[in-house]
Amino acid sequence: MLKDFFFGLKKSAFMNKFAPAETRDGAFFYFKDKLEKAIKGNDDVQFNKIIAVLLDRFSVSVQNSIKDAEEKNTIKDFIISLGDRSIEPVKSYIAKSHIVAHPIEILFELMDKDSVLTFLNDMLTTDDTLFDDPVVEKRIEVLKHFAGETNSSVLSKAGVYLNDSDDRLVIASIRFVRDYVFADNDPDMDKIQEVMLNKFIDEETSMRIKIELLNVFMEQNWKVQNNKKKIEEILPEGYFINAQGYIRVINSAVKARED
């Protein structure tokens, strides 16, 4: 019982962003020692418990950004140094937490890229979000790691996110499509184009979102094949559809791909 109380005190000190750096450092070495003993005793329960505490440190930031980065890098390097044994508790943490940037970085160091992306795809749920829902930040962070990838499952989920109430997730989804690598004659391409055009035409879509959508059509070099007249009527200033059906920008530094 006393051990649990002391453990809790050390955890509070470790997570206290207002405490002196020495206090957090001392707590880290306490948990490091506990973790090494858990490894020697083959105590998986204690090992997983302490890994979760260490990962929690990534959810707070101290005022001294340099010291904050140093502390987090120390924790990151230590967990990576533990090898494959850290994989399952890190995955478990990512599954339960919404602040996952650093844990995902750790996972990429411990596993091959394809395995991590498969796991992250499973973490992308598509249920509706509430206002300021923390799961939105998790989805945005996960989507970043699929930039430039070809993954029809994630593409389908991004199509759902296009209608989310949180503009941050909508924009992250649009940018995911912007960087998506479509195969030749990919049927998913026609489907997502239609979804994005409908989003653009929607009167409730903000101008910021509309511009993000237009950028996808320019980056992917997609033709506007339907509703051309209606789209032209709501294009923001400086944008136009050329004779070949491609969206372009007047006097833009953006270099259009060859038609």
Image (spheres, rainbow, N blue to C red):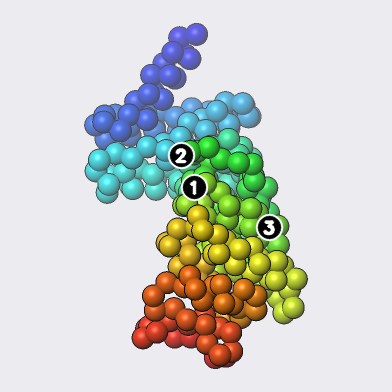
**Residue 1 pos. (x, y %):** 50, 8
Q: Quadrant of residue 148?
A: bottom right
Question: Image height check: is 106 above or below 200?
Answer: above
The residue most toward the top is 1
- Mark 2, residue position: 132
Element on which disc 3 rests: helix
Element on which disc 1 rests: loop
Question: Which mark identifies residue 166?
Answer: 1
Q: Mark 1 vs mark 2: which is more N-terminal?
A: 2
Number of other residues with Cα within 10 Å of mark 2, as a class: few under 14, some 14 to 19, many 20 or more: few
Q: Residue at x 63, y 29 (%)?
A: 44
**Mark 2 is on which residue type?**
Asp
Residue placed most toward the observer, 159 or 238:
238
**Residue 247 pos. (x, y %):** 52, 80
- Mark 3, residue position: 156
Residue placed most toward the observer, 185 or 50:
185
Question: Image height check: is 126 above or below 149?
Answer: above
Residues marked 1 and 2 touching at CB (< 8 Å)? yes
- Per the model, the C-alpha gap separating discs 1 and 2 is 8 Å
Question: Image height check: is 131 above or below 16?
Answer: below
**Mark 1 is on which residue type?**
Asp
**Residue 42 pos. (x, y %):** 63, 29
Question: Which mark identifies residue 225?
Answer: none
Foreground mark, 1 or 3, reads 1
**Residue 73 pos. (x, y %):** 39, 48
Element on which disc 2 rests: loop
Residues marked 2 and 3 touching at CB (< 8 Å)? no
